[in-house]
Amino acid sequence: MTTGKTRKVLLLPGDGIGPEVMKPVAGLLAEMAARKLLSLEVREALIGGAAYDKTGHPLPPETVSLARESDAVLLAAVGGPRYDTLPYEHRPERALLGIREKLGAFANLRPARLFPQLANASTLKPEVIAGLDLLVVRELTGGIYFGAPRGIVTENGIRVGINTERYSEPEIERIARVAFTVARNRRRKVTSVDKANVLESSVLWREVVTRVGRDFPEVSLDHMYVDNAAMQLVRNPGQFDVIVTGNIFGDILSDEASQLTGSIGMLASASVGGRTGLYEPIHGSAPDIAGKDIANPSAMFLSLAMLLDHSLGEAGLARTLEQSVETVLGEGIRTRDIAEPGSRVVGCREMGEKISRVFWDLLEKGSAAK
Ligand code: IPM
Ligand code: MG
């Protein structure tokens, strides 16, 4: 039954496979509202190349204000080859950085968990990835992505590209707090990743994370240089529980971590810290397979699960949705990217229908059991 006030969710389908993977998830949300499972107001807006084509801007002001007045934003993917030659300010990626910044979503949570049903999908040996369950906590609104000065300048007739890695104490402190807080409900281990043997920004990072760690005596903390962390992730990923790191290291390590689980098409992320949470699959817009009904919508459903959990306080529904994805995998129903010998390969639309149907079945069973 519907409880509490109406919650506002904004959908941003974006580009490439974005609209395809969003469709079944939007359908499920609409059904949740229609069946009065939740009191929801769902809206949709433009972002990325799709927004640029219609309005001349990849992040129209209307999208920003709709996002700001929502409780949560669900974003599919942005970008495509058609936009690669646009000036930086007009590129779809700029919209992604812009919305993260405008929502103050400084903490990016990227879980990499191995679905046992997909143990053979990874390129790593099954014994290396068995039981893999780690979380990358990536700082998302600072570091070299946003630091000034930046740009391409000409000095004495020579062109120079400039970016600046910078982190202030409060920026480090707040991301460290998020990492230790989530670690408390996991295996209580934080690994902070930096390059403190070379970079001053990392020296400060290490110092502040260590200090924050003292407020969480039940959580263990160790530090690792980023080059070693990249190696350890493929050597022995089971040693990690929560990895906390800056923006660019987190970008790189979270892609690496995703591949441990077999398919980037399975992983969701949450960007939190502001009033409105932003949820997105970690995969991109995959223009090469767009419009062919072969994309995997699982990460989009799992992003909705993170949204239900973190922004709407519906942990129970989140678990049921995750379980629905697992059940469908367990039935051997797969999109092409995670197909195995003997599995039944379906398209994006059918995979979405299956996951939604199992969700309602599980809910019915759950309430019958009560
Ligand atoms: C990601 C992406 C983005 C990033 C790009 C598309 C701007 O790689 O979400 O990891 O670097 O943050
Ligand atoms: Mg990335």
Image (cartoon, helix red, strand yellow):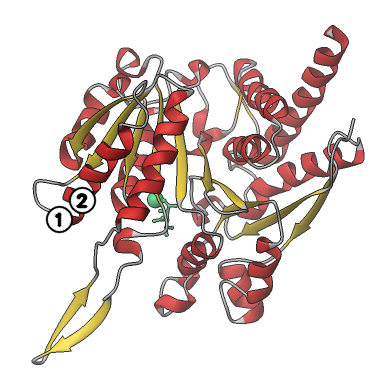
Q: Is mark 1 within 8 Å of ligand 1?
A: no
Mark 2 is on which residue type?
A: Leu
Query: Is residue 257 found left or right of 79 in the rendered image?
Result: left
Q: Position of residue 184 (x, y in %)?
A: 45, 24
Q: Please tell me which residue is depicted at 60% across the width and 37% down the height of the picture.
A: 306
- Say left or right for 331 vs 114: right
Is residue 157 visible to the viewer in this orientation of the structure?
Answer: yes
What element does badge 1 sit on? helix
Q: Disc 1 residue type?
A: Glu
Quadrant into which the N terminus falls: top right
Quarter in which the C terminus is drawn: top right
Identify the residue at horizontal 67%, vertical 28% (top origin). Answer: 315
Asked whether disc 1 touches disc 2, contact meaning CB atoms under 8 Å apart, the reply is yes
Task: Give how far across and how far down residue 362 sits, in percent.
Answer: 77, 18
Q: Is residue 112 visible?
A: no
- The disc placed on residue 200 is 1
* Residue displayed at 46% across by 46% down: 108
Tell me if mark 2 has few (under 14), some (14-19) or many (20+) residues whose alpha carbon lies within 10 angstroms of its own: some
Q: Decide: is 86 above or below 358.
A: below
Residue at left 68%, top 37%? 308
Whether ligand 1 has any atom under 8 Å from the Cβ at mark 2 is answered as no
Cα distance, mark 1 to mark 2?
A: 6 Å
Quadrant assignment, res 171: bottom left
Give SS at disc 2. Answer: helix
- Which residue is tagged 2? 204
**Height in image: 156 above or below 147?**
below
